[in-house]
Each structure stands twice: as structure tokens, then as C-alpha cells.
Image (tube, rainbow, N blue to C red):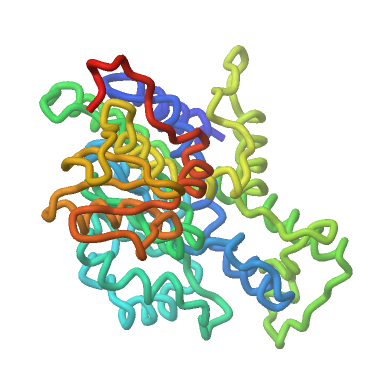
Amino acid sequence: MDEPQSLLFEDANYDNGFVGDVRRLQSDYFAFMCWFYMAPLMCDLRNAALRENAFSFDQPVFAVLYGSSNCGKTSLVETLMASMFSYPRIVDTQNFTPAKLRALQQAYKRFPVVFDDVTRDRFNRYADEIVKDETIPYAEYPCFALSMNADARSFKPEIVKRCLMIYTRTALPGDNVAVRRTLQRSVANIRERLTTALYREYLKRTVSLLDAARDAAGDRPETDGNPAETRGYLPKTTGKRNGETVDALHLSSTTVCALFRENLPPGISMPAWCAPMTLASYQERAFERPRLLLGNLLGADRYHSSRRPPEGCWSLSGHRILVAVSAIEFTRTRTDIPDWLLDDTASSSGQIALDRNLTEDFLRRRIRAPRRWFWQRA
């Protein structure tokens, strides 16, 4: 089986010209790979969790790749689809509407639906209704993968908790044309060598693990006369292992790591990014971007002692943090801040009020007036 080696060769491409935290990018893309490989089986886990009144957010049917352009998002998805189905299939973003997505759920069944380069405007208009809709009237339905470029701002908590969110600031510089062409040729060569052997073995092992979890739980649901279920081709899992909800990302990443380890050539060690991971760890990281933005906004050099600080500065007033912004930036800045931190009763035009205790918990540090020499004080 050559697929693990081919995918590792593609991994090496990220070291050739990409600028930023390359190791983090590799780890994030591996997480997306594990979720994407599990995507055709996610509906079984989610349906079982809903039957048990379990927490359905642990089986996310949406993933959002967002961040810098030229970071390989499209190439990643197309390569993964080639390794799964022999060919990529990208859906036109004009179909990203509630009515169209319901039709895609019915037509695609388990086949993942991929939207590339969804605009922020389209996402804002339709994402709430689409992602928060928990009523799916089909036994088989697909997962949805979306990619968005750097203009994507912070996302609502209702969206974050229902999706696998992956944010990257690592990218290939746009002016490095020679390197970009070299990488494109390398990816094309890798994709030509890919077969579906790796994914077929992945499905075999994953379905076996899910069926074992079902048997351990003593759950044997009705098959409704479906011969595929009777023969064991479809998992009949309760979505639980030892009484706990199955972590889809951990199960998938463990299986992928085992396949990579078994098929590496002698003398080649496992890369650091290829390690089992949990969904909880990535749900926590979904707030990294708003945490970074808010941390910069409340930098020590921006502090001002006056009750009404000038634009771009902040001050303290009891249990509140007051941030002054221009009228043009008010709405955008407010949207970037998680809504549970906002104190709307004290906010006004040009000034955003934050709950000090909640903001300190979110940033994991104390918010206090910086110590300054008397001639530095504003």
C-alpha cells in the first residue's frame, strides 16, 4: 500500500516555501483528514447519539477550513477525495442555501459535500439556518466541508460548537511563483499515484470498531429490512463505547495513525503531527482567533486611564472593560468578540463594554492597568 507514503511526501511539501507555523498547519490538516475520512460514517454516529438522547455536537457534520489564502486548502480537499473516491467533486458555492443543501443531503447520501471559497456574505446569510438545523429527515446524509479565505472573521458560538473549525495563518507567499509551480507539479504527481486502497482498509477497520462498540453495548437495532445492514456492510453502532459517546475524531485518527505506522518504509519514523487527537481539543482551539484578536485589542500599550478613552484604547471601570472604537469599526469589532463577554447595558456608540471577569477567564490572564512611570501616564 503506497498511499501513506504518498501522503507523507505531500506533507513534506509544506516545508518548501510555506511561511508561518508549518507544524501547526500539518497537525490541523491531519485533523481535517481524519474528520473527512470519517464523514461517510458520521450520520450513523449522529443518528445513534440522537436515539440515545446523547450530545449530538460530538458528531459534527460540518467542518470549516478558514484563514490565509494560498495555504493549500483546495489542494488538501481534492487530494483527500482522490484517495477516497478516485476523483474530487466540488459543489458550486451558489448552492450554499438552505433549500439547495436539503436537496444535496437527499441526493449525496453519504458522499461528502464540499464547498470551496465560500464568501463571508453568503456564509452569514445562510449558515445559521443551515448549521443549526438539527432535523434531518434522512437515515443517510452527508457531511459538509467549507473553505473560506482570510476575510473570514470570528464565528458565532452556535456555529463553533456544531462544526470542526480549523483556522490557519500559514501560507505560501503569493510572489513566490516558481515555488508554487513546483509544489503544484508535486501535488499532481502524488495525486496520480493515489488509489483508494488506503481508504478501503480504513473503512474496513473503522466499521469493525463501530460494530464492536455496538456489540459491547448490547445494542442490536432493527435493520428495517436493509440487506446491506444485515450483511454488516453498514455500521449498526449505538455510537457508544463502554457507555460513553464515541469520539469520532479520536476513533478516526487512531485508525489512520495505525495504517500509517504499518505501511511506512523501514527507517522512516512517524511525523510529529500524525498522532491520535480528540474532538474536544479542536473545539477548544476554535476560539483561538477571537482570543488572539481580543488579546491584541487589550494590549498594555493601548491602556488609557480616562473614563472615556480615545479610539483604539481601553480602560477599566469597576467590573467592566471599556474599549473605544471608531464608528466605522464598531460593528466589525463587536462581531469579533464572543457575545457572552459583551455587556450591552454599558455599551454605547463608539465604546464596547466587556465583563471583566469573563474576559479574564477567556484570555486566561488578569486584566489590570499596566504600571507606568508618572511621565508615561495618560
Instruction: Find the residue positioned furthest to the front.
Output: 374
Residue 170 image position (x, y, % from top left): 31, 31
* Residue 124: % across, % down: 27, 66
Indicate the quadrant containing the N terminus: top left, top right, bottom left or bottom right. Answer: top right
User: Is residue 198 depicted above or below 106 in this figure?
Assistant: above
Front residue of 116 and 332: 332
Name the image quarter holding residue 41: bottom right
Q: Residue at x 39, y 51 (%)?
A: 354
Q: Position of residue 188 (x, y in %)?
A: 29, 36
Can I make out residue 1 in this image? yes
Would you place residue 274 above or below residue 340 in this image?
A: above
Farthest residue toward the top? 267
210 over 9 or under it: above or below: below
Going 34% across and 69% down the picture, which residue do you hit?
Answer: 127
Residue at left 42%, top 28%?
11
In the image, is 177 to the left or to the right of 291? left
